[in-house]
Image (tube, rainbow, N blue to C red):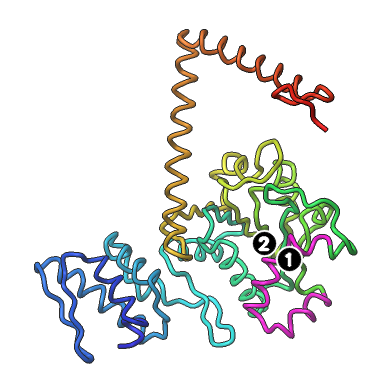
Amino acid sequence: MVRLLGPQDRLLTTLEREHPGVDVHVRGNQITLQGERPAVEQAATLVEELIRMVRNGTDLGEVEVQSSARILRDGSGSPADVLSQAILTSRGKSIRPKTLGQKAYVDAIDQHTIVFGIGPAGTGKTYLAMAKAVQALTRKEVDRIILTRPAVEAGERLGFLPGTLTDKIDPYLRPLYDALNEMMDPELVPKLLASGVVEVAPLAYMRGRTLNNSFVVLDEAQNTTPEQMKMFLTRLGFGSTMVVTGDITQVDLPGGASGLSLVTRVLDGIDDIHFARLTSDDVVRHNLVGRIVDAYTKYDAERQKAEYERAERRRSGGGNGDARGAQGVNRAARRAATRDRLPGRSRRGTQRW
């Protein structure tokens, strides 16, 4: 009962939020549901599924309760069957998909040679791909794991970093090292890295290689150029699996198109290549992360709509004045910038030292 209700009955509160028309009462080991019959039957089905998951050894959290309720509403099967399949067990902790979208993503990795995991932050794209890589290595389905990502700063310029080449690229690859240490024995990881069984390298090191019998994970793929993406995908060798993860809405490239955005159009419909698209419903971080993702998605959609409407007005001939006005504003801005660059003068005309 403690595992079912969670600490301080947090999961009970989540259950009540999912079924607001049902009153839930707990006394000892007995749960009582009261309300309209259809609502009570739906809540009872959810409670029974949660009990099955607890008996199967699943550690419940708010995400699992919300995902189970969503699966039942969609009629997508039994949550206990969908969410109880563990990918990997490390140091007493089971790694398993927690949402229906994550389950479809994991299944796609088993069924396809190249899988693109595209979705917002917190949807477990990289984490689940790493778990599948470690699982494949443990089962001896592959000979090595290769983890790579482009060395691109997130909107900042850090300058020249001190140390050797390894010291310079380690900060960019740190998330991959963290996941490895969480999924494998920390004492074993350095040995696997030294022997080459596990390789963590920047994307620039992939050119000219053929990756056979390997599980290859490309992380932060939204920061690849179209040329880099083509180069990476053509490294595929025999007996290998590739997983490419990224969030198209968080591109840090200083200019140009994202290779991940382009590849969704170029390779769409090719056999043995699958695009798994995760959404805010698959976020397994704090509840606010999903709301933040939705808010930014709404903002981007409104901005694109406004830009489209402005372009339509210009094409219809009603935007000539706006265009001339914009040109005038640009000229005024250039004149102001020129004044600011004049030596010894500030924008207000006072002396500057």
x and y percentages locating residue 71 in the rendered image = 32, 64
Query: Is residue 257 a member of the stretch shown in magenta?
Result: no
| Quarter of the figure with residue 181 | bottom right
Q: Which residue is mark 2?
A: 217
* Image quadrant containing the N terminus: bottom left
Residue at 48 percent of width and 55 percent of height = 278
Q: Residues within 10 Å of mark 2 (few under 14, many from 20)?
A: many
x%, y% of residue 350? Answer: 75, 25
Amino acid type at image mark 1: Ile
Find the distance from the CA under tag 1 to the CA under tag 2: 6 Å
Query: Compared with residue 18, is residue 87 higher up or lower down, i.e. above or below?
Result: below
Q: Which of the image's four quarters has the C terminus?
A: top right
Residue in the image at 80% along x and 55% along y: 206
Q: Position of residue 346 (x, y in %)?
A: 75, 26
Which is more toward the observer, 92 or 146? 92
Left or right position of 290 against 216: left
Residue segment shown in magenta: 168-195
Which structural element holds mark 1?
A: strand
Residue at the spot of label 1:
146
Residue occupying the point 60% across, 56% down: 245
In primary-sequence order, the first of circles 1 and 2 is: 1
Name the chief secondary structure element in magenta: helix
Q: Secondary structure at mark 2?
A: strand
Side of 289 relative to 24 (left or right) = right
